[in-house]
Image (cartoon, helix red, strand yellow):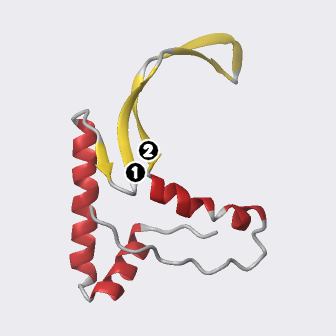
């Protein structure tokens, strides 16, 4: 399995849409900035058929320093981002399990889902 970077997404979308890579990069970056700003304000971001991002609070807990196992360290509560995949994403990602289990096998072709409304 390979890692897709923002650059990979820009190139792919640019090739598919005919937009320049700079235009695509600007749209992707603005989208990510807006999602980050919305979450930083404590609001939820829901992208239909993709998933939702929510800010959750972790509880205070006691940790231990591996170098000093006898010393307890208090880890304060903090805000974290949780992602919950949407139904369509769950269904499509479920098909990747055989590829993860058998990385040497050739993967079946991925079929594109029909575009859905946002």
Separation of residues labelled 2 and 1 (CA atoms): 7 Å
2 vs 1, front mark: 1
Rendered view: 111 above or below 49 = below
The image quarter in which residue 10 lies: bottom left
The image quarter in which residue 6 lies: bottom left
According to the image, label 2 marks what residue?
Answer: 83
Q: Nearer the viewer, residue 45 or 75?
A: 45
Q: Which image quarter holds the C terminus?
A: bottom left
Q: Nearer the viewer, residue 25 or 109?
A: 109
Residue drawn at 36 percent across, 38 percent down: 54
Looking at marks 2 and 1 on the same chain, the residue that comes earlier in the sequence is marked by 1
Residue 39 is situated, as x and y percent measured from the top left of the image, at 28, 40
Residue drawn at 43 percent across, 19 percent down: 77
Label 2, secondary structure: give it: strand
Label 1, secondary structure: give it: strand
Residue drawn at 72 percent across, 16 percent down: 69
Q: Nearer the viewer, residue 82 or 77?
A: 82
Q: Which image quarter holds the N terminus?
A: bottom right
Q: Nearer the viewer, residue 26 or 13?
A: 13
Residue 8 is situated, as x and y percent measured from the top left of the image, at 43, 75
- Say if mark 2 contacts mark 1, CB within 8 Å: yes
Q: Is residue 90 left or right of residue 83?
A: right
Rendered view: 39 above or below 106 = above
Residue 99 is situated, as x and y percent measured from the top left of the image, at 70, 68
Q: Which mark is residue 118?
A: none
The image quarter in which residue 49 lies: bottom left
**Mark 2: few, some, or many residues within 10 Å (few <14, many ≥20)?**
few
**Mark 1: few, some, or many residues within 10 Å (few <14, many ≥20)?**
some
Rendered view: 92 above or below 74 = below
Residue drawn at 35 percent across, 87 percent down: 15
Q: Which mark is residue 51?
A: 1
């Amino acid at each position: 399995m390979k890692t897709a970077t923002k650059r990979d997404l820009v190139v792919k979308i640019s090739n598919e849409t005919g937009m320049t890579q700079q235009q695509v990069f600007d749209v992707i970056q603005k989208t990510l900035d807006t999602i980050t700003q919305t979450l930083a304000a404590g609001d939820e971001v829901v992208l239909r058929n993709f998933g939702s991002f929510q800010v959750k609070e972790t509880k205070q807990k006691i940790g231990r320093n591996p170098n000093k196992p006898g010393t307890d360290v208090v880890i304060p509560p903090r805000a974290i981002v949780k992602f919950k995949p949407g139904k369509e994403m769950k269904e499509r990602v479920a098909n990747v399990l055989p590829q993860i289990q058998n990385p040497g096998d050739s993967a079946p072709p991925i079929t594109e889902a029909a575009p859905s409304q946002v």
